[in-house]
Image (spheres, rainbow, N blue to C red):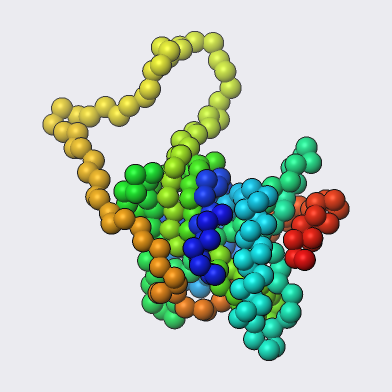
Amino acid sequence: MQVISENFAVARSVKVKYPKINRPYKFDDKEQRTLPCEAKEQGAEYLMDIELTKDQAKTLNKLAKALYEDRRKPKWPEDCPKPFKILEDEEGNETYVAKVKKKAAYDGELTDPPSVFDAKNVDVTSPDFPLSTGSTANVAFTLVPYSMASNHGVTLRLHSVQVTKLLAIAVKSPFSVEEGYSAPEGFVGETTLKEDEEDEPVKKKPAPVLTVVEDADEDDEPIVAKKKGGKASKPSGDMASVIDEWDD
C-alpha cells in the first residue's frame, strides 16, 4: 500500500474483481443485480472490488482508523469499522476485499469517470475498455470518513486505475464436446471484411502523466454502500482475533 497522504493511497498490484467503471451502474432491486444506468439516476456509481494482501489490509485499516478519529464529529460513533471484508473460500483460505467506488453525479452535476491508464501511463479510458475480473492493477483512491443514520466508517472513493496485467475475458460455450470438425492448432477466429470495406487502424490518444493531488477536487459528501442480496462470508474465529489486534 502506497500512502500518498493521510487520505489518499494507492493499492499496488491488486487483483480486480467485478469492475464496473466504464459507465455508471446501479443495483436493480427487481433484477437483483447491478446493471448499467444513466449517470443522474439515484444510486448511479462507478465501482469495483479489489483483493488486498494481509499487509495491505493492515495498512489500510490503520490509515482509515486514524483519519476517522481525526475528522470524527461529536455525534459520530467512536468506533471505525474496517474498510474491507474478510471472505473465506471453500478450502478455508481468507482474502481481504475492499470496495472502491465513485458516485456518477453529485447534486445533479455529473462527475468524470475514473481514469484508466495502461502500464506505460497511456490513457485508455473508454466505455469499451475491457477491464475484467482477475486483472492486476494499481488503484488510487481517496479515503472519506462519514456517518449516516444506519452506517458509518470510511469509504474508499475511486480516483484512477493503472492496469498492469489485463486478463482476457473468457467466452463460455453453452455446448458440449461433439464428434466432428476441429479447428487447426493455434487458430484464432477473426472478422471477415466485405470487399468494399477497409480495416482502419486504432489510434491511441496520449495522456498526461498521472499526478496525484491531495483531494483537491473532492468533497466530503459521504457515500453509503448499497446493500446487495448476497451475504458475505464471515471471518473465522482465529482470523477475527488477529484482525482485531490491528486496532490496538
* Residue 163 percent location from the top left of the image: 43, 46
Task: Report whether 247 appears left or right of 156.
Answer: right
Of residues 223 and 218, the one nearer the viewer is 218
Residue 23 shows up from this direction: no
Task: Report whether 58 appears left or right of 163.
Answer: right
Asked if 72 appears above or below 215 in the picture, the reply is: below
Q: Residue at x 61, y 81 (%)?
A: 71
Q: Quadrant of residue 178?
A: top right
Asked if 194 appears above or below 226 in the picture, the reply is: above
Q: Quadrant of residue 61?
A: bottom right
Of residues 42 and 49, the one nearer the viewer is 49
Q: Residue at x 80, y 51 (%)?
A: 239
Asked if 112 appears above or below 109 in the picture, the reply is: above
Residue 9 shows up from this direction: yes
Q: Residue at x 40, y 68 (%)?
A: 213
* Residue 193 percent location from the top left of the image: 22, 29
Q: Residue at x 15, y 27 (%)?
A: 195
Q: Residue furthest right?
A: 237
Asked if 57 appears above or below 111 in the picture, the reply is: above
In the rendered view of the protein, which quadrant contains the N terminus?
A: bottom right
* Residue 206 percent location from the top left of the image: 25, 50
Of residues 45 and 88, the one nearer the viewer is 88
